[in-house]
Image (spheres, helix red, strand yellow):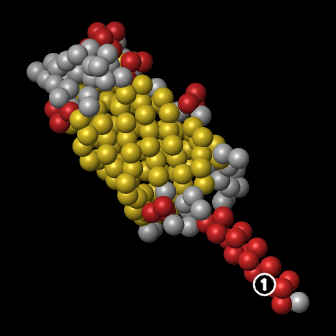
Amino acid sequence: MKIILATFCLWVAAAVSVWAMPLSYALDAGESRVGFEVPFGPDQITGTMPVRSADIALDFAQPSNSRISVVLDVGNAQANFPFATQALRGPRVLDAAAFPDITFVSNSIEVQRDAPSKARLGGDITIRGVTRPIVLDVELFRPAGRAPGERELLFVRLEGAVSRAAFGATGWDDLVGDEVSLDLMLRIDLEE
């Protein structure tokens, strides 16, 4: 009987340990987007950038064990008018030929006590080969109609801002503002 009880306790401990580990998620690139906005005189330049890849692991029991890294495809960035798209990808701004990716890698997460689906995500962003720290606001969503606690399919929204000048993307700074607002919406599916 002691052997059966010990075996059962080991099985339960292993099951709880596995359950508490971070859950790995796969990116649904077709349903994910990155939007950006920057002042352009009295107007705004807006656009999108495809997500090339993402590595996402969420630990709902210990959020500090979660990690998010995202790679954006600079060469396929689009702005709301053709000249802005050409300028954005060109050597004076993002220089897609020399720096085809923008990367973000998280290094800390702090969940809001009064809103457990919201957090502040710290990490490093690399643009034009220059890496700087950044803090993003994060929120998790379930699609409408999903049961509370269901984690198979989620949306992760990340919002923040960067200075173009901090990364050497200073082209047309007499016309275009310095602060670029970022809005990433990632659809993620639990990996099996």
The quadrant where residue 163 appears: top left
Q: Total of numbered circles in the picture?
A: 1
> Where is residue 16 shown, x and y percent of the image?
68, 71
> Where is residue 147 shown, x and y percent of the image?
71, 55
* Left-right relation of 112 to 40: right
Q: Residue at x 47, y 52 (%)?
A: 67
For this rendering, which residue is in front, 27 or 180? 27
Q: Residue at x 50, y 33 (%)?
A: 53
Q: Is residue 11 visible?
A: yes
Q: Residue at x 16, y 32 (%)?
A: 165
* Left-right relation of 47 to 150: left
- Label 1 sits on a secondary structure element that is helix
Residue of label 1: 6
Q: Is residue 175 visible?
A: no
> Where is residue 128 shown, x and y percent of the image?
26, 28
Three-letter amino acid code at disc 1?
Ala
> Where is residue 168 shown, x and y percent of the image?
17, 29
For this rendering, which residue is in front, 186 or 129? 129
Q: Residue at x 67, y 59 (%)?
A: 148
Farthest-out residue, bottom = 2
Farthest-out residue, left = 174
Classify mark 1: residues with Cα within 10 Å, few (<14), some (14-19) or many (20+): few
